[in-house]
Image (cartoon, helix red, strand yellow):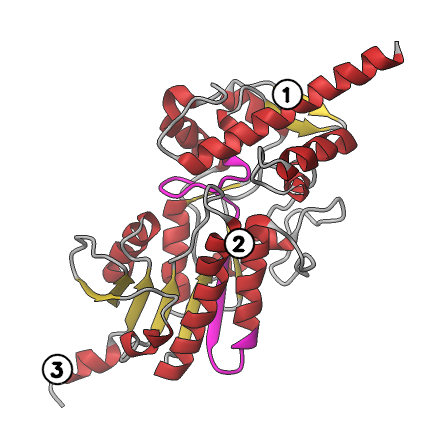
Amino acid sequence: MTSAVRARRTTPTVAVTGAAGRLGAAVVPRLIAAGVSVIGIDTHRRPLPGVSWRIADVRDPALASRLTGIDSVVHLATDRALAVPAADRRAVNVRGTEVLLDAAVAAGVRRAVLLTSAAVYGATAANRVPLDEDAALCVAGHEGLVGDWLGMEQAAERHAGDLHVTVLRPASLVGDVVDVLMPGMFEAVRLLAIRDGRCCWQFCHTDDLAEATVYAATGQVCGAVTVGCDGWLERADVERVSGLRSVVLPAGLAAATAQRLHRIGALNSPASDLDYLTHPWVVGSQRLHAAGWQPQWTNEDALRAHLAALGDSAGRGLLVVDRKDATRAAAGATLAIVGSLALARLRSRNRA
């Protein structure tokens, strides 16, 4: 057997969906540096050295033909924004994942890596800090992005007998890709805090997530895998780092206002997302730590980097910036605060 033939047999081939996106651009070079042969699957190409491209949409039922010769697939072709209609986003996230996993089984792929969120555990006062990776997930029926992520995980469960699926569950993302749930709050004029709640602020920088993805793609971790900076920040820490003050509202008032704003379309996030600003959902990255992975970012450094990326838009309310999803989240947070305070003042006058 020639050395070239041996190399072909010993070098794993990993397909990365969404390879032309921001997260794909962070993951692919790390996979190549780890000695992996990478096939980029996307609707368009991006100039990434060492990548072979196969143009495809993950929602295409003929996707199996693009996965021939693949050992593992890393699925990054998802939409984490709230600016698009929920039905369109769910078609990409949930239906796209279902089609991809069906195609992977049909093509004989052995391993799949999905990216959801630690938010699938839910946020309750009973949550342990940090959560165990095998903790129960929140119940189905959630709207918004949490519902999408739960739908993706349910698709993974249905393929558990045919495919080794690793699910990465990051804390709130900052960096090249930003989640809208908590990081978006920093474009509001004030931080929102819920009275009698305990919000533990934890972040995951995309640099650390990209490195964790390599661990998952190469089989160093498997199953449910959480990713995040070690520890968490309390509200006082967040206020000190950001320079923003918090508006503290009763839970019932904040929820009622969020429901009204969501009903009229002024707030994209469902009111249930307020739970994530009320209760802890800190994760410990236990399986990654056991495999030798260490986060390069602390929560404080990740938050400072996020604020630096926001620039002048940090704490400036409804200022329009390029990241439309973050702007929508900031607008929603600001409206929730202003709306809640307005209702509180109105009720106070009515009682007088």
69 vs 143, left or right, is: left
Tell me, yes or no, if residue 284 can be seen here: no
Mark 3 or 1: in front is 1
SS under mark 2: loop
Tell me the residue that label 2 is attached to.
Answer: 285
Task: Residue 287: give x, y in percent of width and height.
Answer: 52, 61
Considering depth in this image, is 237 or 60 the residue closer to the camera?
Answer: 60
Name which residue type carries label 1: Val
Q: Position of residue 206 (x, y in %)?
A: 39, 46
Instruction: Looking at the picture, tell me which residue is in the foreground, 231 or 60.
Output: 60
Q: Position of residue 259 (x, y in %)?
A: 69, 37
Above or below for 48 versus 338: below
Query: 310 or 210: nearer the eye?
Result: 310
| 67 shown above or below 241 | below
Judge the density around disc 2: few (<14), some (14-19), many (≥20) Cα neighbours within 10 Å. Answer: many
Q: Which of the two discs, 3 and 1, labels the residue nearer the N terminus? A: 3
From this view, report whether residue 104 is shown above or below residue 348: below
Residue 287: in magenta span: no
Specify the farthest residue to the right: 351
Q: Say the numbered circle drawn on residue 338.
A: 1
Give the extent of the magenta segment. Answer: 158-183
The image quarter in which residue 245 lies: top right
Q: Amino acid at mark 2?
A: Ser
Cα–Cα gap, marks 3 and 2:
38 Å
Separation of residues labelled 3 and 1 (CA atoms):
67 Å
Quick one: SS at disc 1?
A: helix
Which residue is labeled 3 in the image?
Answer: 3
Q: Nearer the viewer, residue 128 or 44?
A: 44
Specify which label sits upstream in the sequence, 3 or 2.
3
Q: Are marks 3 and 1 in contact (CB under 8 Å)?
A: no
Q: Is residue 33 left or right of residue 334?
A: left
